[in-house]
Amino acid sequence: MDFLPLFHNLKGRQVLVVGGGEVAVRKVRLVHEASALVTVVAKEFCPDLLEMARVDQKSRHNAINLITAPYDHSHMIDLAPIVLVIAATNDRKLNHVVSEHAQASNILANVVDDPEFSTVIFPSIVDRSPIQIAISSGGDAPVLVRLLRTQLESLIPAGTSHLAALAGRFRETVKAKFSSGLDRKAFWEKVFSGTVAEQAYANNITEAERLLSESLENHDKIETGEVYLVGTGPGDPDLLTFKALRLMQQADLVFYDQGVSAAVLNLVRRDAGRVYVGRAESKHPVTEENIIQKMITSVAQGNRVVHLVCGDPLTFDQGKQEIETLMEHNISLHVVPGITTPAGYAGVPATDKRNDSDINV
């Protein structure tokens, strides 16, 4: 391990950035978002940096200070104590001088795109504050790191920040409720994979708090499950929504219709039960009433049930009937839309201006 991953608290602390171009902009933005006090030294500044400083001054944060001058060691001395120095000029020799000055004063130094002369490097960041994920190759494969970050961005719901903040607010309450660490772990695992999490992901914070409080009060009771009616689109797994994929991988029992592709089914959690409810050779393996009854029974046992349908769940009356019946039984139900038409997948527009009365489905 060439670098030890650490998270540095820069709030209210001095950071010096040498350089006024686009590379410097990216670093200034990062440390500014971390609430550092940033001083930027350069002979001239690009428009983006000038705008950042203007907005900062207008908001009266006064956290970005621009000094129009060539870099001199005195800048580092005058700003003491500095916790981080970033060399972000297009002059490699100057960058090395800045790094040497910082290291001689035992200040952390980052030379952009030059890990050999850096004592710290900036990772690629997936930010769901307070959840943060840092990825680094030590400068060996930055393109690969960016690809990995893109994959993680698609896997982690944007609302994870809401869920983590909610957990933080309830942490002491949960700790007081459960004396055993194992019990707390089991409780949080259930919260993070259940209805509370889904409400937090959707930014329904008040409802998420209510459900979490309810779970704490009734933790010793058998919890009821829930049903998710999930559209799988035209069958291409790449066209599933992030939410559909997440629910498929959390399901305890999966019902699937005719037309749901094998490629989509392969993404279902491995140990989840599967029930085919489509048509086969003019026979009906399961009637709609039987499907719903099986769902009700499974939900009463605390299971998370997912019903996968081709296209969008509400395209046909079957979905409407299912929703109405489950609601009559007070079953927690959520609908996840899917791409409604293979025509769209094939690049055929839904309407044609030459014939306004036609709709392609």
Image (cartoon, rainbow, N blue to C red):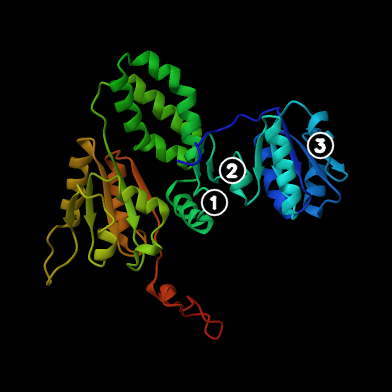
Give me the residue at 19% from left, 63% from top. Answer: 278
* Left or right: 192 in relation to 85: left
| x and y percentages locating residue 153 in the rendered image | 48, 50
Q: Earlier in the sequence, mark 1 or mark 2?
A: 2
Q: Residues within 10 Å of mark 1 (few under 14, many from 20)?
A: some
User: Is the Cβ of the residue at disc 1 closer than 8 Å to that at disc 2?
Assistant: yes
* Amino acid under disc 1: Gly
Residue 73: assigned label: 3
Instruction: Work out whether residue 157 or residue 152 is closer to the camera in this orientation and state it.
Output: 152
Separation of residues labelled 3 and 2 (CA atoms): 22 Å
Give me the residue at 36% from left, 59% from top. Answer: 314
Separation of residues labelled 3 and 1 (CA atoms): 27 Å
Q: Residues within 10 Å of mark 3 (few under 14, many from 20)?
A: few
Q: Earlier in the sequence, mark 3 or mark 1?
A: 3
Give me the residue at 11% from left, 67% from top. Answer: 283
Give me the residue at 70% from left, 41% from top. Answer: 99
Say whether residue 214 is visible. Answer: yes
Residue 139: assigned label: 1
Residue 121: assigned label: 2
Q: Secondary structure at mark 1?
A: loop
